[in-house]
Amino acid sequence: MNNCTITNMSTAISKLAGNKSIRTKLIFHFVIITLILGLFVGIYLNFVQSKILHDELERNGVTLAVQISESSINPMLTDNYVNLQWLVENVHATEKDVLYVFILDENRNVVVDTFQNGFPSQLQYINMPSSEASTLLLDTEYGLVTDVSYPILGGRSGEVHVGMSHARVSASIFQSNVFLVFFMLLFLIVGISGSYYSATRLFSPIAALDRGVVEFGKGNLEQKVVVSSEDEIGNLSRSFNEMADRIRSLITDKEQYSQEILETRNYLNTIISGSRDGILALNSKSRIEFCNEAFCSISGFMKYEVLGDDILNYIPAFKKHLNASSAAKKVDQLVEANIITKDGSITPLFLSIQSIDYQGDLKYVLIAKDISEQKEFESLKNNIISNISHELRTPLNIMRGFMEVAITEDDKEKRNTFLVKSIEAADRQNWMIQDLLEVSSTLNGTDRISLTSISINGIIYASLDTLKSKITFAGIKVIRNTEKDHMVHADPEKLKYAILKILDNAIKFNIKNGSIEVGTNSYGDFVEIYVRDTGIGIDKKYMGRIFERFYQIDSSSTRKYGGNGLGLSIARDIVLGHGGNIWLESEPGKGSTFHVTLKRYASAPSIEANVLQPALN
């Protein structure tokens, strides 16, 4: 076998072994090699044995042919065919391997033979000898036969043919092959057992090392390999244990450091995420590298929309600070600036801008505080002060004017008219002061209500009577839809004050010669009071804030309608304090309808006193 054949055989064996364990591969290779060697040895032994047996058979055949040739000289010369027949039959009978014997004369005519069923004519002209023995292998119906011919007296008196059968030789070879196969199987079983035992002892440390590596790879850092030998495998196991100890130490230290870094990062992220102020980090080209959730909330943009973008697209005023930093390389300022939000609106910010040097690169850290509420509060505060001052000063001026005129007026009727006007102005101022006191006591939680059973119609009639002169002066028609009376559990003074504020609002914003409808309805355990006017109405965008304190659609001091912006908020606080509800329906140019619901007296709780709590704006 050449090297190429051995290589191809090894490759074929490896493919058959597949992805098995080393021990299995070793046993598999041993079995295959044993089978191959056994096959070659068996073939060789079979060949040698066959050669020896066939050579021996051929020699025996030649010896018999020579003996018969020498013994048949006299009978052939004397034509003693009986003696010749006896001779060939005796050889045929005594020699087990002799299948046939026949003698031909010099003319190749059959003299004698041992065939029982007649001489086969095809044997008459085959294997003609020369001066010595000649052999010819024949394939007959009886199997393989070696025909051995030998001349009598050099061929002058004929020739002898002895047919040597291969049956006994083939049987011997078959028995030898059976024995050889049995021996090979026995050798294979013993070899497999021995190789399994040896491979197990040899590869047990390797298997243990493999299991240790697998467990270590799964994260079991405490995994150790038992060192059971002092050979190369034992050294490898010790090296693995030492390596595992070093890796475990490194991983433990790294996990500890990573945990500390992660905790610090989470802590900082919690602080940054919990901040209500926007926090940004910019590079030297004003590109946003980081922003927190608060900045996204202020700007209206998502993080992925902001990161990598130029801050000037959001806060254009930052450009001057960027230019200043380019020159001075240091910025540390507190400024006010505006941000352009996603919907295009402008939101005022209070910015803390600081430039830092991070690993040799210029960075900016911005803290943006939304001051829109502060700005709105400042504007509201200024408007409230201006409006309250205006509303308080106006009645005083009116009183002073009418009183000055009344002092100099001799006509008693006119003087009394001027004094009535002064009293009305004083009542107006007193009402505004009462509003302020009502709001103050509600906010402080000191405003107490006393609940009792009262008539809704009685409250409505009393409220209309209080505003009678104002209604008459405005030329407004009042429609009462209060045929059926209802009893509620309420504070009569507080509830009347709330109804007065709603009616006053309907009068104030009504059109000239308009009308106001006041009515009641009942729904199960609740009673509804509604006030519907034919006034200017309210746009939907203002309806959400109409019950806020000091809120007025037109808050300028020169507005067309007077008032301090407290009436509806006071009405809301009183209604909610009674466990009721209040809401508005309105459409510009078509008037407004205010609805108030309260519990009936029968289902109302038996409470004599309660503290009026302020409602949230």
Image (tube, grey):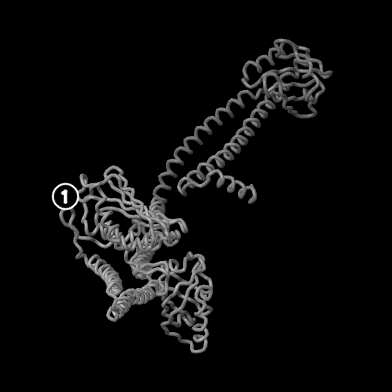
Residue 320 against residue 372 in the figure, above or below: below
| Residue 433, picture quadrant | bottom left
According to the image, label 1 marks what residue? 606
Residue at (58%, 48%) from the top-left corner?
A: 10
Q: Does residue 240 appear in the picture of this structure?
A: yes
Residue 86 horizontal/vertical position (percent) = 69, 12
Is 415 situated left or right of 532 in this image? left
Residue at (31%, 73%) from the top-left corner?
A: 414
Outermost residue, right side: 107
In this rendered view, identify the residue nearer to me: 485 or 543: 485
Residue 376 horizontal/vertical position (percent) = 39, 72
Three-letter amino acid code of the residue under disc 1: Ser
| Residue 70, picture quadrant | top right
Is 27 situated left or right of 247 in this image? right
Is 78 situated left or right of 198 in this image? right
Quadrant location, the C terminus: bottom left
